Image (cartoon, rainbow, N blue to C red):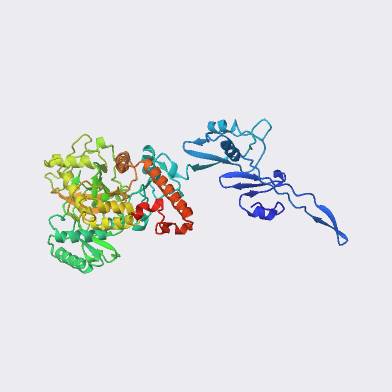
Amino acid sequence: RRPPCHSKARLEARKGVQTGPHLRGTHRVVFKGTSERLLLPRPRRPTPRVHGGGRDLVPAPSRGGPPRAHCPTAAAGAAAKRRPNAATPHWGRRRHRLACARCRQGRRIPLPSHAKRAWGGSISHPTKQRRRTWCCSPPKLCMSSRSGGGGGSRRLVVNLSSCKYEILREVTRQLGYDEADEQDDNWDLCWSDLSVGTERVSKLRSFQRLNHFPSMLEICRKGLLSRHMARMAARLPAEFSFYPAALNLPEQLDEFLAALRRNKGRLDQGLPGVSTFILKPTNGCQGRGIHLVQTFEQVKDIDISNYVAQAYVPDPLCVDGFKFDVRIYALVLSVDPLKIYLFDEGLARLATTPYAPPTSDNLDEATMHLTNTAVNRHASGYIEPYHASNAAVAPDSANDAGGASKPLGDGGGSGGSKRPASAVLDAVARRRGVPPGTLVSDVSDIVVKTVLAVQPLLAHAYHTAVSSTSRDAAAACAACPCISLDHARADGGRGACTCPPSVCFEVLGFDIMFDAGLRPWLLEVNHSPSFTCDSALDRQVKSALLADTLCALSQRPETRQAYLKDQSQAVKHRLYAAAATGLPYSSAPCAASAGVAAPGLAAAAA
């Protein structure tokens, strides 16, 4: 609705309205993404009128009339109507609209070549020789993607609004992804650093993928992981003996205090067998809040609520005299049926202080007993990692004969404090005379068994979320002849899995430590492993991991376009069905019960 021309106060109160003498009797209203001049005539000169013996000045009423477009956007729209096949100026796959802030002095403004071709040269002040445009300083480019955001894009679209790692933006850009806007919900992939719940997954569309499973924190929280490992070890002690004994505090505080009292008695008598516990916050990460204790006096000043007391792995395997662990990356592509892929490269993280068995004198030396990069990065003994081809170093446990490290491989002892896991494990196998794939096979068993411990919970949470979103997917799962217990056939038949692809996936980081007998131990599981790239080795390993993960999803933009097209057709069917039956739109689903088969409801009714 066009406001009266004489209501200047109302115009100034509205956002985007500019008035002034330079407008020469017109009010310029600038809307979002475009500009439109409302040509309102100047108020007539006050007409003198005799009233009550005096002269009152009364403004004449304004003449109405439709507004005239006075900007390139409106001119281009009119030209497109005259020429339906005319090309619209754009950069890549985004259309650009010029919005003028205010008309200023006539001067040339450089524009991209495509804009020059569309508008017939550089924009200048309106003249009789050129198309009626305007000059502005500076031109405002408003970008809007085709077909309402990423829905019409011919490339895959990724949502990284909740991701802080730049390596993900680089990898997705190299793989041809377009980054979605904050308001765009037609993305194909969403990568988030935060955990998700069932409600978030229930809102996903069939073509979208999310990098977290609901309830995956059951193994990624240290307290929950210890409970599940203890439950499985009680039933299958031979299969689940890879997790160190752990006590959840304060629930198992009595057992923890009893163990500390036994340690006190052995220390007073000088007896061996003193147990060392690592206190870890159940929700902690990057080595924050970790303490090593042996007696009750060392616990008095620590708030042990919501902590896990994990047994210290005795006699760990060392590399060049330093304690180390390996970060193994696993991709959980589906939880029902369970599909896990192990990445062929990882990171071996070394401490920066030579290892010594824990005693009351060195329990506070975090750079000796902890291998977290965040703890050792700022230590004086930290050595920047080198390239993978130079980092093969032979490990040497603290209890080997001679007690001195003997470097092997191309890089000698210059591997740095972070090295490729494959090079370190291969050097271990060669030095100990172990078959090449033995250590990797042992690590694979730990990864599979850890996820199997919570697979029923993961499958239940996932099906609860997905079934509320897609009935077709639930029906496909119910008819699938795969070996999944949730939707196996009653007759026990087996066959190829026809389940729809999972809308969730997850990259997990498993921290594995080896003892002197080459026995692997699971320390913890990370649901959002760090993708910070502080060195060339980090960039090499993590970029390859992300690229393989995204390629394993096998996403195609045609899937999104087909889905949106089907949704649009379904909306049209519902509208047409409502118009045909004469019922209101809210009553359109009842058309089938009235005897009129609505096209969009035929499949559901069947």
In the picture, measured across the screen, residue 9 lies left or right of residue 499, that is: right
Q: Is residue 154 visible?
A: yes
Which residue is at the far right? 53
- Depth check: give the residue in front, 373 or 79: 79
Rendering coords of residue 50 (x, y %): 86, 57
Residue at figure coordinates x 16%, y 63% from the top left: 267
In the picture, measured across the screen, residue 542 lies left or right of residue 50, that is: left
In the picture, measured across the screen, residue 54 lies left or right of residue 554, that is: right
Rendering coords of residue 598 (x, y %): 41, 53
- Depth check: give the residue in front, 350 or 354: 350
Residue at figure coordinates x 70%, y 44% from the top left: 23
Q: Which quadrant of the rendered structure holds the C terminus?
A: bottom left
In the picture, measured across the screen, residue 505 lies left or right of residue 169, that is: left
Count all numbered tags in the image, as a single digit. 0
- Depth check: give the residue in front, 492 or 3: 492
Q: Is residue 277 visible?
A: no
Rendering coords of residue 472 (x, y %): 32, 52
Residue at figure coordinates x 77%, y 49% from the top left: 44
Rendering coords of residue 458 (x, y %): 27, 56
Which residue is at the far bottom? 254
- Depth check: give the residue in front, 438 or 505: 505
Location of residue 115 with respect to 195 vertically, above or below = above
Task: Classify residue 290 by image quadrant.
Answer: bottom left
